[in-house]
């Protein structure tokens, strides 16, 4: 992110705020479950244990987006700023929109990167959005003759791999990517689905997925397993699960329901079912009655989406700008989630912050962004 803010920092101060429950602001982290049981009953039990542990240092009802917005305005007042420019990425776009709703007089402009509309609840958006993004990303292989000839149809091979692992997980010996040591673990369908989901956030990494899936389809699971375990280790220390539950359970509970149409997707209904189970054991705060109303008004808004984003697709940005007459949407070609640092976007971002006029921006430089070709071997793509 430092690169994305390089131009802005030449003329302005950047204030980073740890939202309550994250970083050094009373981090609400839960221990990683030792059991591999991911049934709703097991997830509910783990959430109950986590809530009981955290209750000693936090009232979990007061870690919502609404509380974060109040904190943010307190920071604004403390630094003596009459108006602020807000930058939000992913969930941060919810915070930015809510702030602009509650404190319009203090909001000079907003940048919404990979935006979640106020109207969108989070319970079961993940499965369909991921499948739609995978269709676009995997088409980079099926529409490239050399990739299709060598690796076939990545989605068909992924479906076959997931079905096989659901029926019978496999024990895999692999080399740990961090330590280099030989290890042995069980590869499950949920592990593969999780890796696919996270790699889809970054098309440059997702370019490797067709090759990984093809290798696993042939019984060579080592590389897939090593990368999955490395990803899980990296994420474990970066997630404030307690804070996430306080937010989602308070603000999105009604949407945590199984959707029959999602049964055939990579993720299926596991996420909303797991979240519903955990929220049954989690203390809940209150959200304003207009919390899920769209942000409307004249606030200058720069809205960014990646063409291949697996969680906040371009249609979300289209929805947001409909009620923002001074808003403008840029969809970045071939990009995934969190795109403010891609190509010439840092320059356009800085220009927007200076003049607070998204419609005056010349986005022609974004045409230089291109697609990452799919890897046909572990050495890279075809020359």
Image (cartoon, rainbow, N blue to C red):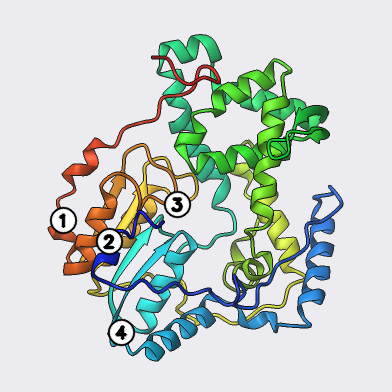
Q: Mark 4 points at which residue?
A: 106
Indicate whether 43 appears above or below 282.
above
Indicate whether 306 appears above or below 13.
above
Q: Residues within 10 Å of mark 2 (few under 14, many from 20)?
A: many
Q: Alpha carbon of mark 3 to alpha carbon of mark 4: how far?
A: 27 Å
Q: Position of residue 173 (x, y in %)?
A: 81, 27
At a point 67% along the width and 64% down the height, the residue shown is 241
Q: Alpha carbon of mark 2 to alpha carbon of mark 3: how far?
A: 15 Å
Q: Alpha carbon of mark 4 to alpha carbon of mark 2: how far?
A: 17 Å
Q: Alpha carbon of mark 1 to alpha carbon of mark 3: how far?
A: 23 Å
Q: Alpha carbon of mark 1 to alpha carbon of mark 2: how far?
A: 10 Å
| SS category of the residue bearing label 2 | strand
Indicate whether 285 appears above or below 369.
below
At a point 72% along the width and 19% down the height, the residue shown is 220
| Residue 361 badge | 1
Q: Which of marks 3 and 4 is nearer the N terminus?
A: 4
Closer to the camera: disc 3 or disc 4? Answer: 4
């Amino acid at each position: 992110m430092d690169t994305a803010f390089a131009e802005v920092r030449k003329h302005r101060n950047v204030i980073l705020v740890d939202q309550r429950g994250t970083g050094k602001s009373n981090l609400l982290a839960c221990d990683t479950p030792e059991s591999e049981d991911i049934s709703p009953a097991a997830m509910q039990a783990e959430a109950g244990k986590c809530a009981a542990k955290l209750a000693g240092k936090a009232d979990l009802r007061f870690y919502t987006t609404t509380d974060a917005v109040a904190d943010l305005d307190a920071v604004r007042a403390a630094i003596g700023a009459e108006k602020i420019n807000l930058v939000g990425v992913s969930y941060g776009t919810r915070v930015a929109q809510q702030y602009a709703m509650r404190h319009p007089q203090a909001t000079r402009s907003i940048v919404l990167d990979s935006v979640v509309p106020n109207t969108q609840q989070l319970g079961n958006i993940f499965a369909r959005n991921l499948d739609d993004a995978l269709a676009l990303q995997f088409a980079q292989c099926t529409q490239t003759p050399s990739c299709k000839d060598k690796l076939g149809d990545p989605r068909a091979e992924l479906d076959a791999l997931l079905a096989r692992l659901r029926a019978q997980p496999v024990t895999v010996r692999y080399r740990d990517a961090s330590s280099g040591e030989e290890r042995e673990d069980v590869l499950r369908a949920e592990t593969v689905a999780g890796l696919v989901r996270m790699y889809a956030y970054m098309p440059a990494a997702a370019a490797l997925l067709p090759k990984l899936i093809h290798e696993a389809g042939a019984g060579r699971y080592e590389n897939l397993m090593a990368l999955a375990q490395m990803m899980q280790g990296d994420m474990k220390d970066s997630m404030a699960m307690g804070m996430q539950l306080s937010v989602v359970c308070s603000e999105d509970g009604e949407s945590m329901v199984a959707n029959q149409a999602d049964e055939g997707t990579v993720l299926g209904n596991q996420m909303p079912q797991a979240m519903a189970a955990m929220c049954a054991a989690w203390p809940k705060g209150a959200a304003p009655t207009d919390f899920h109303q769209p942000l409307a008004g004249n606030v200058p808004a720069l809205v960014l989406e990646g063409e291949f984003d697996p969680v906040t697709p371009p249609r979300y940005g289209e929805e947001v700008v409909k009620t923002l007459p001074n808003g403008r949407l840029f969809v970045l070609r071939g990009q995934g989630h969190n795109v403010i640092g891609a190509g010439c976007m840092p320059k356009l971002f800085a220009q927007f912050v200076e003049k607070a006029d998204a419609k005056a921006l010349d986005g022609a430089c974004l045409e230089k962004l291109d697609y990452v070709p799919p890897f046909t071997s572990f050495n890279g793509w075809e020359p």
